[in-house]
Image (spheres, helix red, strand yellow):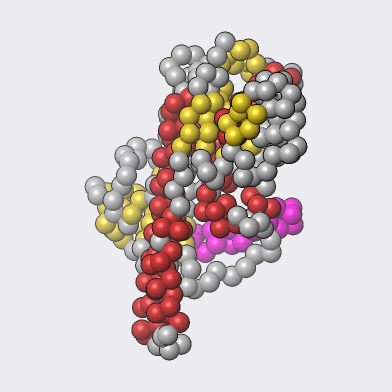
Amino acid sequence: MANTILQQSLKNLESAFKNFFAHRTGFPKFKSKHKKQSIRYPESCSIQGKSLKLPKLGIVKAKFPKTISGKIKSVTVSKTSTDKYFAAILFETNNLIPHKTGKISGIDLGLTSRVTVFDGETCTKVDPIKPTRKYAKRLKRRQQALSRKTKGSNNRKKQVKRVAKVHEKIANTRLDFLHKLSRKLVDENVQTRHGASVLVVENLCVKGLARTKLAKSVLDAGFGMLINFLGYKLEREGGKLIEVDRFFPSTKLCNCCKSKNNSLNLSIREWVCPNCQTHHDRDENAAKNIREEGVKILSTNTVGHTEIQACGEDVRLVGACAKKHSSVKQESPVTA
């Protein structure tokens, strides 16, 4: 079975070069021996009781977060920088995507409130968590201890793992929060009647925001990861994720009279429209405008024929409306 594993490595290299020549990513690089390592078993893998059988390795004890009932296509075993092993199992399933209906909700992403959701009737806000700042003191102390260790010594290698554990704690805290938040948003917008649900978000340029003075907070928020999670979870529930153009002035546009207020800056959280004298909450006004723009995108798209109903509005939905995102660790892996 070793030949199939080596062949799979060559296939991965081929895919990397194809993505490079298609200008989708950078030039392939060798894996660092100090970071995450992985290997894929394309066949001859099976589950025996509470263990996972892998070619050449034999039976390995594992914890399964869910029941795997279909045919196993491949297993990818990865090792983290803190010496933890995970197995991502790809298997076939006969579960069909449920046909459900919900509502069109606009979602404004921010730093003061992680998300502000407007479903056509009410606005709800979710407070952010800041794992990088929460564990900053612990990380600082362990990095200071690392700098005092002699290069090449065993004590330095041990301290490197202690630093890596703090980074892993920060990443896991952020990942757990984003998974729970995306699941909550999808569940609250999907009901049990026939049809589909739609979530509308902004297509933020996270790379550009990461160059500002708020870079640390922007990267800690994980906006791109949240949109990825919403995309694939909505797809499983029969819904769709629509992205509004990043240049759409959702914050500065008055939701009542549609006049644009160019005098707003980031420090102003509430403002009064100079035209109609309507008092606005910054985030709630943006969520309402994003929802209206999403409805407009759906209603003006006449190419497709997939018609859905949400909140009594007849709209047409096409897969080209929403930009596809590649899923990042969609489900919790199996701990081996």
- Residue 44 seen anywhere in this rendered image of the structure: no
Q: Is residue 4 above or below residue 204?
A: below
282 relative position to 48: left or right? right
296 relative position to 198: left or right? right
Residue at 74% x, 23% y: name it: 275
Residue at 41% x, 40% y: name it: 180
Q: Position of residue 81 (x, y in %)?
A: 42, 67
Q: Quadrant of residue 298?
A: top right
Q: Is residue 286 above or below residue 305?
A: below
Residue at 54% x, 45% y: name it: 111
Dominant SS of magenta comes to: helix
Asked whether 16 or 320 is in front, the reply is: 320
- Residue 336 seen anywhere in this rendered image of the structure: yes
Find the magenta span and give its range. Answer: 1-25
Residue at 56% x, 42% y: name it: 110
Q: Position of residue 277 (x, y in %)?
A: 67, 23
59 relative position to 108: left or right? left
Asked whether 311 or 108 is in front, the reply is: 108
User: Which quarter of the figure is the C terminus placed in?
Assistant: bottom left
Q: Position of residue 170 (x, y in %)?
A: 42, 58
**Outermost residue toward the top in this view:** 312
Asked whether 116 or 228 is in front, the reply is: 116
Magenta residue check for 6: yes
The number of callouts visible is 0
Q: Is residue 307 above or below residue 263?
A: above
Q: Position of residue 5 (x, y in %)?
A: 49, 61
